[in-house]
Image (spheres, grey):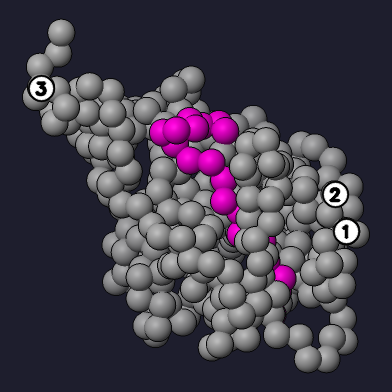
């Protein structure tokens, strides 16, 4: 019989994401509040929530920019939020604010997907959810009013930050291996993407890598380890089949994931994938700095690069 102290003893701690107690309890260390959809007074962007799968609860938020005189239909942006696969959501204040700004600046229609999160739903469930959301977009292209009236399905982009960048890559791989009738992915943008590397050589004793391996195993119990193609893209035999025409990889100099984003960029360039590959590094900044300081000059530069990536789609 366990002691009363078992209720407080922490056996796994991975801030700011997950804490696990000896008695089996798990908690998200940083949980966000729900922000309702709105007509944003600053950007003029409208938003509304939709149910993608009532059985699983999979849902998303749609965004529509202020449309005064529509000369031609707009690109569609499919966005996946970050948070280590464990925290944050498409409905949190930080992502609602960011999507309002991005939709207004890029003049796109967007769908921000609220996939199910670990540890309640371990990976690869989030990949199944996000793939379902892409298929839902295709099925609703002539039914959902905002899609039907405003979206050019020949200009679809997928983007995400951190874990969302990882998901973005994996969705592009799946799109390259499967037929997505009625939807053409022009490009993907990976912002400070969450990737890992297999433990090799003198890295085996690296404390941070060992800790990361434990975290990955925790959220993806059936994984082969840090050499899993889900988190180590160059180990994927389908790497060169990435299903888009161009890729933008964004990293930040002081981000612990910076080198892995650079490695992704290098390996994709050598993989035989036949597309346009772009890279942007922000000096002096850390992981997803643009979400926490969105009005800064460097956040503005990152926004401009994303907007340019989307707008120069021809």
The earlier-in-sequence mark between 3 and 1 is 3
The earlier-in-sequence mark between 2 and 3 is 3
Residue on which disc 2 sits: 139
On the image, the x and y values in percent for residue 81 come to 51, 56
Disc on res. 143: 1
Instruction: Tell me the mark number nearer the camera, choosing from 1 and 2.
Output: 1
Residue drawn at (56%, 39%) of the image: 126
Tell me which segment is drawn in magenta: 104-125
Q: CA distance from mark 3 to mark 1?
A: 56 Å
Q: Is residue 107 above or below residue 98?
A: below
Secondary structure beneath dot 1 equals loop
Mark 1 and 2 residues: CB-CB less than 8 Å, in contact?
A: yes
Classify mark 3: residues with Cα within 10 Å, few (<14), some (14-19) or many (20+): few
Residue drawn at (76%, 86%) of the image: 67
Classify mark 1: residues with Cα within 10 Å, few (<14), some (14-19) or many (20+): few
Say which of 171 and 269 sits in front: 171
The N terminus - image quarter: top left
On the image, the x and y values in percent for residue 140 come to 84, 54
Q: CA distance from mark 1 to mark 2?
A: 8 Å
Occupied quadrant, residue 229: top right
Furthest-bottom residue in view? 68
Classify mark 2: residues with Cα within 10 Å, few (<14), some (14-19) or many (20+): some
Instruction: Tell me the mark number nearer the camera, choosing from 2 and 3.
Output: 3
Secondary structure beneath dot 3 equals helix
Residue on which disc 3 sits: 4
Q: CA distance from mark 2 to mark 3?
A: 52 Å
On the question of residue 132 being in view, the answer is yes
């Amino acid at each position: 019989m366990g002691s009363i102290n078992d209720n407080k003893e922490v056996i796994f701690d991975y801030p700011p994401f997950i804490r696990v107690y000896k008695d089996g309890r798990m908690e998200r260390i940083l949980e966000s509040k729900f922000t309702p959809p709105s007509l944003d007074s600053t950007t003029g962007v409208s938003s509304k929530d939709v149910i993608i799968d009532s059985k699983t609860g999979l849902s998303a938020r749609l965004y529509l920019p202020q449309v005064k005189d529509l000369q031609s239909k707009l690109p569609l942006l499919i966005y996946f939020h970050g948070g280590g696969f464990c925290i944050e959501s498409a409905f949190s204040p930080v992502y609602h604010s960011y999507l309002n700004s991005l939709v207004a600046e890029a003049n796109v229609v967007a769908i921000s997907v609220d996939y199910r999160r670990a540890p309640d739903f371990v990976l690869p469930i989030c990949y199944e959810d996000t793939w379902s959301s892409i298929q839902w977009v295709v099925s609703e292209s002539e039914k959902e009013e905002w899609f039907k009236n405003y979206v050019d399905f020949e200009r679809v982009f997928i983007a995400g930050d951190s874990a969302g960048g990882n998901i973005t890559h994996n969705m592009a791989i799946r799109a390259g291996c499967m037929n997505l009738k009625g939807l053409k992915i022009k490009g993907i943008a990976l912002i400070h993407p969450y990737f890992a590397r297999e433990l090799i050589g003198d890295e085996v004793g690296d404390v941070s890598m060992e800790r990361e391996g434990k975290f990955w195993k925790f959220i993806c119990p059936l994984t082969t380890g840090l050499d899993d193609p889900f988190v180590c893209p160059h180990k994927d035999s389908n790497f060169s089949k990435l299903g888009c025409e161009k890729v933008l990889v964004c990293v930040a100099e002081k981000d612990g994931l910076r080198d892995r984003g650079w490695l992704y960029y290098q390996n994709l360039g050598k993989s035989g994938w036949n597309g346009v590959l772009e890279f942007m590094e922000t000096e002096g900044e850390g992981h997803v700095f643009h979400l926490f300081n969105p009005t800064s000059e460097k956040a503005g530069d990152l926004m401009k690069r994303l907007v340019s990536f989307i707008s120069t789609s021809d």
